[in-house]
Image (cartoon, helix red, strand yellow):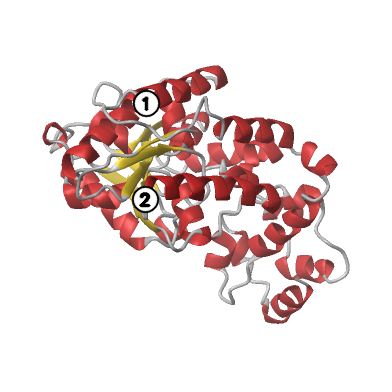
Amino acid sequence: MENKIQSYLETCVDCKSCMKGCPMLYNFTGSPKSLLTHFTTQKPTSDMVFSCASCGLCAKMCPTDIDFGYIFGESKKVYAQDKKVLKSYGYGALNFHQKNSFSKFFSTTMKFSEGKYKNMAFMPGCALSSYSPSLVQKVFGHLREKLDGIGIIQQCCGTPTRMVGDMAQFGVYHSQLESDLAKMGADTVVTACENCFMSIKTYAPHIKILSLYEVLADIGVPKNAMNAYAHHQKVALHDPCPTRYESGLHVAVRTLLEKIGLEYEEFKYNREKTLCCGSGGMLELTNPSLAKEQMRSRAEQTQCESIVSYCQSCAESMSRGGKNGLHILDFIFDEKVFSAQPKNGTLKKWYNRYQSRKIIKKLKATPLKN
């Protein structure tokens, strides 16, 4: 990493483009070049490292491709080797979440032995199943109608562990996910979660990863959702930062909004230049005050009362930021909920995940053993 820092220092023009929209850099420096100079003699402090949202905006905005996210990401891996350091940044709660996410009480798979798409699996992701088991059920029901034989896996991708730098434990979790998919015979995954999308794309390139929203744009939405919101008040569309470079996904989501007739406005910073919602990099655990400030800041960048995203964590962040955060799937599949999402507490979210698992296990097929 030392060579990379030196290279960055030599190319940095100190224009501060990397700082525009960044949740944390202004809290630690007034000059990116001075910060890089400091890093040549001293490593980044743990407070600085664990305040990075890992959103990738700095690298996108920099005219010379300097990536502070890379520096902080590599530094997290070093700090993560000391579990005492990790515990001071909320690792206990994160570890509890991850262990339960991979337990038999909250994860399961369902494979169907017949059908053209039996090699495909739908992966809703942790946040969506924690929010609404019925929504997961409706989405999967629609996929089954259009993609005969598609299976489903309720499993975590391990991103929370990776985001705090614990790569050894992430490797264990990722291997479990790959093993479950292999048992299903799934070589293609359709996911509703942007973190799952990027994790599988990056760490399991042999598995074909598809975004649910690109699939829906292709196969169509339920008939009752077509042009159903032509008279709904305008909403703002927030793009999640993990998939900032997935241009096809950005187009698909906007296509879906047009299909259902929902008028929307773009944030000034959108698509590949989108800003973090405040929950990136596990910021709610590692620097909760900064996370809250970023949620408020992002939510206030639109006059619209409702902000729609295609990431459930982003939707919740926009609600915490003072607006009405909604998921695009609320509109497509659950017209009774689109006005406002229920505010689920921690226990309710775990209960929902358990209920989602029960629903999956009751489908007319034999689930794989955990």
User: Can residue 41 be seen in this snapshot?
Assistant: yes
Horizontally, residue 172 falls left or right of residue 261, namely: right
Q: Tag on residue 186?
A: 2
Q: Quadrant of residue 70?
A: bottom right
Q: Secondary structure at mark 1?
A: helix
Q: Quadrant of residue 33?
A: bottom right
Q: Is residue 156 left or right of residue 115?
A: right
Name the residue located 21 percent from the left edge and 36 percent from the top edge.
142
Mark seen at residue 361: 1
Under mark 2, the amino acid is: Ala
Instruction: Give left or right: position of 86 versus 146.
Output: right
**Image height of 160 relative to 137, above or below:** below
Give percent across and percent down for residue 157: 52, 45
Q: Is residue 288 visible?
A: no
Q: Secondary structure at mark 2?
A: loop
Along the line of sight, which residue is nearer the eye, 6 or 355?
355
Where, by quadrant of the figure, is residue 209 drawn?
bottom left
Quadrant containing the N terminus is bottom right
Name of the residue lying farthest toward the right: 41
Q: Is residue 126 left or right of residue 308?
A: right
Give coordinates of residue 181: x percent, y percent.
43, 47
Please tell me which of labels 2 and 1 falls first in the chain.
2
Which x, y percent locates residue 43?
83, 62
Which label sits on residue 333?
A: none
Mark 2, other Cα within 10 Å: few <14 / some 14–19 / many ≥20? many
**Nearer to the camera, 205 or 338:** 205
Task: Name which residue lies at 28% across and 35% down.
Answer: 140
Is the C-beta separation of discs 2 and 1 under 8 Å? Answer: no
Amino acid type at mark 1: Lys
